[in-house]
Amino acid sequence: MASQPHSLSYVGCNFLRPRLVLSTLSGRPVKIRKIRAKEENPGLRDFEASFIRLIDKVTNGSRIEINQTGTTLYYQPGLLSGGVLEHDCSPHRSIGYYLESLLCLAPFMKHPLRIVLRGVTNDQVDPSVDVLKATALPLLKKFGIDGEGFELKGGGEMPRLSGRGWKMAIIVILLPLQVLLPLPKKITRRGMPPKGGGEVIFACPVRKVLRPIQFTDPGKIKRIRGTAYSVRVSPQIANRIVDSARSILNKFIPDIYIYTDHMKGTSSGKSPGFGLSLVAETTNGTFLGAELASNPQGQGTAVLPEELGLNCAKLLLEEIYRGGCVDSTNQSLVLLLMTLGQQDVSKVLLGPLSPYTIEFLRHLRSFFQIMFKIETKPSHEELQGGEKVLMTCVGIGFSNLSKIIK
Amino acid sequence: MEEKDRKKHHKKHSGPKADKKRKRHLNDLGLGDDEDARKRNPKAFAVQSAVRMARTFHRTQDLKTKKHHIPVVDRTPLEPPPVVVVVVGPPKVGKSTLIKCLIRNFTRQKLIEIRGPVTIVSGKRRRLTIIECGCDINTMIDLAKVADLVLMLIDASFGFEMETFEFLNICQVHGFPKIMGVLTHLDTFKNNKQLKKTKKRLKHRFWTEVYQGAKLFYLSGMVHGEYQKQEIHNLGRFISVMKFRPLTWQTSHPYVLADRMEDLTNPEDLRVNPKCDRKVSLYGYLRGAYLKNKSQIHMPGVGDFAVSDVSFLPDPCALPEQQKKRSLNEKDKLIYAPLSGVGGVVYDKDAIYIDLGGSHAHQDEEEEVRPNHELVQSLISTHSTIDVKMASSKVSLFMDSKPLGSEDVENQKFVMPKEEKQIDLKTGRVRRKAMFEEENDDGASDEEEGQDEEMSEDEMDGGEGGDGDDIEGESDKEVPGQELGLRSAKRLKREETTEETAVELPAFADSDDDLEMSSGEEGETDLDESKEEAEDHGDEEESDKKESSGSDSESSSRRISKFTPLPHKEDKEQRENHNLDHHLGKKVVPTTDSGNCTADEASESEAEGSSQDEEEEEGSNDDLEVEESNRKGIQSAPDKNVDGVEWAELKTVEEEEEDVENLLKEEEEYGEENDFSADTAGALKWKEDLTQKAAEAFLRQQQSAPNLRKLVYGTVAEDADEEDDADEELGGLFHVSRPDKESRQKANALDCSKFPVETPQDWDLDEVMNSIQDCFVTGKWEADKDAAKLLEEDEELYGDFEDLETGVVHKGKPAAEGDEAGSEGEEEDKAGKEPKLGEEEEKKKRMDKKHKLKEMFDAEYDEGDATYFDDLKGEMQKQAQLNRAEFEDQDDESRVQYEGFRPGMYVRIEIENIPCEFVLNFDPHYPIILGGLGNSEGNVGYVQLRLKKHRWYKKILKTRDPIIFSLGWRRFQTIPMYYIEDHNGRHRLLKYSPQHMHCGATFWGPITPQGTGFLAIQSVSGTTPDFRIAATGVVLDLDKSITVVKKLKLTGFPFKIYKNTSFIKGMFNSPLEVAKFEGAAIRTVSGIRGQIKKALRKPEGAFRATFEDKLLMSDIVFMRTWYPVSIPAFYNPVTSLLKPAGEKDTWTGMKTTGQLRHERGIRLKQNKDSLYKPIVREKKHFNKLHIPKALQKALPFKNKPKNHEKKAKPTKDQWRPAVIREPHEKKISALLTALGTVHSYKIKKAKLNHHQHLKDYLKRKHKEEEEKFKRQKEAKKKLFRIMGQKEKKRQKSSLKGSGEREK
């Protein structure tokens, strides 16, 4: 036997996703102990179990061992296989929670991944499908992950951001039949917490190697697009959100369009709610996203749509203030893809590193022995928001071991 | 008539004549052109056939594109590792001689015995590592994988040998390095013609194997046991100018061809258990790709290991510094071959010898007094004096926590190199190792005298394995590092740097420490607060903290921490001081919080978040509120400038201290204000202290980078390691686990990638809004991109134009600062005003303009030609440039952190848990290769290959026979299954590999990237006369499960037959099985197709089936199914290097069943039914035809069986007696018969005669007849002619008559 690479050991349930994802990509087994060991309700939660199940679905030959109480998890990764899959996500976390990890894994499958995810499309904790579609997919394209069958449909419709005729006019799908129909302009199924009921299709082609990127100039923001959605509430709410959001954003740039998207019937999921997602696009193809959703039914106080619109617009401004070529939610994704590149130098300019990213960097080091060169770039005289961080690394020369050659 | 018929003259319009005429005419007119139109106007004649045109175009394009290679990023390092030259050939062909000659050619040194790789400097830019490859197929395979250049020696007097071809085939599989043939033994040919012939024959054969025109070198003969100098010189030249193309496997994997090995195992462990696993360090140049610490490697012939430590050493065989001269200095012609004893150290099986330099070895007496001749030499060549060395060495001693007395050194006598030399084999080795360990522990040993020091130095070198002494001595910078053991050297360096930083930027260190301390404390407070964490965690974290401040860096950091507060006290009043203290006291919270608002913050906010919210609404505890306000105050300020505030650093620089303090205070105040009153003040505050902020920003720029790095990665990795080590050394009680140290966030927090905005800024304020206004297209642009500016510039360039319609002339703006449009006078004026500056500016402007114009021109004319290929190439080149430039300016220490160890470095790799046989049976003649493995290449799984039996291998391969693969770095035995892919994609098992076709193969083994070539051999032991490479191929797919199937036919028999339905039994055993196969297609042997319908209740396993026709009871029904085959999980690395020396080529693994049977004489037990027996056919007996009576009646008489009654025996009266003649009668009858015969003969003869006569007569008759007929014909002819003439005449006369009449 080839000696099994020594496994990594961690404590606690935090960063479960990156640990499993990195373990899968690096082929090193991982052991996680003391998962909520001291809590009243110890062990893995539903959504984590669902995530582990998802990982099991997309891989072949992985070994997962969980002890009786669920406080210890041992994961020995197999090879990524992909294919046409379906997964029912836990309604405790939104689909974004699962999708973020799938985005990391999808380009390295054996068969192109086409997965239907069911669950909550928009919530307050995780990045929604709308925003991921608008920000993460263009990012993947920069690494050469593009082509036929690269799409993310669902959640909500995000207006076409660039006029380059992407095949990603985003729409939601319910039935396979509808996939074939010309893309409907309105959302067919969106699910809000607590009950969910939304559906998303994610498809991604496979690549053998990734391109290195030099992404250090974010450019200037040329347009802002967004979607105000409302399900199982008054259709007027979306308009109210739009008005309030525009009231702030109009001071900066005139090119703003926020779609209103009201869902009815089965396509509106099982719970009421509304929200807004905004995306700013720059001249250099950088996408910065922000979003806000209403409190789930029966939890917290009711939120005024105007307030939500304003806050979301401010969040976007905050994101713009942080700046960089990648928005804060996708930092870890871009860093991972840089790591997995050829043995060439990749550079990216980021805003301030989020705590998640910092932890992710540490994980990257322990899994791939890679360190990033981190340089702070202070904003000069210009009024361009906060400090930026220039991340540089040499890729590890990763190649997709799953892909079949003929 | 004639004139009429004559044609009119047509003027020639085409043809040469017309052309000539036309030309003349044109010439007369003066329009004449010498060239014809084709030349004059080629475009008009360009296309005659569009199709042909298209074809020629395609063809040229095809040819052009065929020449292209996919461009790859050039990743060769600036200082590449030595080129690996493998000298290969069958035994007694002259390999060693060639190597010796080459070495002598390059270095003017003569090596007596060559063991292992020899590295030499061959030119200003090139080094060579020459290694000999024996005939062991293991060695051949390993070396083919690392070779850059292969010198293939061929004995011309004998011709090619199998080894040569085997090696060529191995090379083909594992990436084809450059191969150069060298013909030796040419002097054995006496006949010149025969020599020529042989050369030609060998050359052509070589070309077919390598490529047409492959270089083949001829070494004509030996002089005094060496090859001719001139020939070797030429060969050397060829080698040193050769270019190499990058091979995929080599460029994507790091590898080291080890040229030195050391056993680092603890001697105590060895004593206790001599067979314990060893810890070994291996040295060599890193090649291929970047090597990361702690990564996985494979040692061919040993196994897989994890690198426990990597460090780089000064290059023992460095390239000369840049010099103008074309040739090398004698001094620079270095040679490095520790295994052969050139680097000063010889490794024997159980001892290490130090070579003291060849020709001066006899001066042993001197060495009693003086330490070492080589050392003295090295001393001479050093540029620094001993004093300097002493000084530097002393520095290291101070740093050492436990300085050694000189007595200690004396006690450890074995430390002395002199001693070393004299010790016998047995003690030498063991002691040597022990000494190495001590070194590590002690760091540096104390010496009083320069001599002693030198000796220790030497000894260290020995311990380390002897870098070239002369090299070592040369640079003083390296002296301390080399004098000490490796680790101590590292520590020393680090300490030096810390000290430096401490001197230069005391506050910086302080701030950092503060950051760390506070974070540690933070951890503690966190613990106290939440008390969720387990106790041990707390302990660990505490120890962690202690450790960070403690151990070796302790003193300096403490000094500094004491140092910083002083200025405050001096500068400030009591109140302020108090404030400061207060602030510092509270800093626990703010620093961590603001320290980039990261992990700590998150965890804190997690703990405090809820209370915070409540507070804002209700307002609770005073203490908390104060803290809260503090926090806020400090956070809100940075929010405008910085987000992650490296606050504490502000205090770092003493000059700024005061201001910063003020600022802090103000911010604090502001924070409070902010908290209690409205947010209005913030905006104004923001505007204040702009200068300070600038300074602040500058500082941040200076310091934040390392801090951010520290925040992310903790202290720099190696520092951390050192600390760990120190800790272990100290007590061994405390154990640090990294993840705990790293994860400052709560282990069980929410896993979310969002970056929540802690303190949202007030976006209603204009100032806040302004801070991002330039992020939008509507904002201000950088100078070179601003639309307005660009327009302006364009106007300058293209401003001048004349409106043709109106006749108005537009002038470009006369450029304000001396455009070219500006008049000279103006320029002069300006020159007067701003003498130099203006001119320069002007010049610059002009240049800019020129560049711009050129760019535009290029864009218009050059870019059009650029093909996709050119673009791609350009892109790659750009990337290569970036790769080179990115880390160029950093020192190796930090570079290694980011990139890993780059190829070209001389590295030392420590590996643990190596089997003891590796050390015990070490044989330097066998290459030791450390091949780096990529991610998950250390795992095992199912590997699918495309495989073809080698056309020269005599047998075919059998499924399930163990075979040895060479794949990637590895050689291993495994059990492959051969299959072929059917049209529907089904993988169908084959019993044997096809003879001349590709087939698939699957085995359980190490995962290796797709597209990697492999070869298979049946056995690596011994030599066989036959070609050994059994199969070659390529990896297609890797997976954790595989489906290879074989056919399975289930048979059954009908037991009840209805019309088209039958009941079948015997195919299954239970209704459940039937249920599984419902609907499956079945068939009878006679070809009637059917389908399984449903199980019957009885008998078990029977089912109902329908067919397209009625079955017979005698029919056999069968169903075709596919049964998945399991692949045996057998993976057995070939551990040939672990075999005892001299037996390394005798590794045998699992044997095939065939081999076992053959060895033990076990015959296969055959199935009796399968045996062939003589066929015995029984005589077939048919019964009589029996026709029923009724039928008989109905039959017509003709067909009726004739019922003849059996005739009774003839009665006596019917019975006639035979006649017996008398002798006389007999005679008569004989005579009669004879007469009769004579008569009949006569008649016959007469008849024949008659017949002949008749024939003749008829012939004659026929002739006559013919003659007669001829005659008649002639007569007739005559007659008719006459008649005809007559007739003619008559007619003529009659015609005439009438004609005359007409006239």
Image: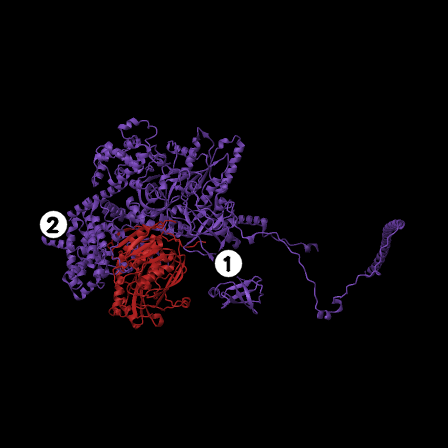
Relative image position of residue B798 (x, y in whole percent): 34, 54
Kindly state the secondary structure of the residue where label 2 is placed: helix
Q: Position of residue A118 (x, y in %)?
A: 35, 65
- Image coordinates of residue B264 in percent, x first then y, are 31, 41
Q: How far apart are marks 1 and 2 (CA)?
A: 93 Å
Residue B799 visible in the snapshot: no
- Eye-nearest disc, 1 or 2: 1
**Which quadrant of the figure contains the C terminus of chain A?**
bottom left
Subunit bearing disc 2: B
Please say which color scheme the image uses.
by chain
The residue most toward the left is B574
- Where is residue B100, by image quadrant? top left
Are callouts 1 and 2 both on one chain? yes
* Chain the render paints purple: B
B614 versus B81 height, above or below: below
Q: Identify the image quadrant of residue B1217.
A: bottom right
From the viewer's perspective, is B684 left or right of B1086?
left
Local crowd size for mark 1, using a 10 Å CA cut-off: few (<14), some (14–19), many (≥20): few
What's the amino acid at mark 2? Lys
- Residue nearer the viewer, B848 or B1025: B1025
N-terminal label among 1 and 2 = 2
Which chain comes out red in the rendered image? A
Q: Residue B896 carries which label?
A: none
Q: Which is more toward the observer, A149 or B1267?
A: A149
Check disc 1 and report the residue beneath it. B1048
SS at mark 1? strand
* Three-letter amino acid code of the residue under disc 1: Leu
Mark 2 crowd level (few <14, some 14–19, many ≥20, 10 Å Cα): some
Work out whether residue B1124 can be spotted.
yes
The residue indicated by pointer 2 is: B569
Relative side of B578 to B404, left or right: left
Position in image of residue B867 (x %, y %): 42, 51
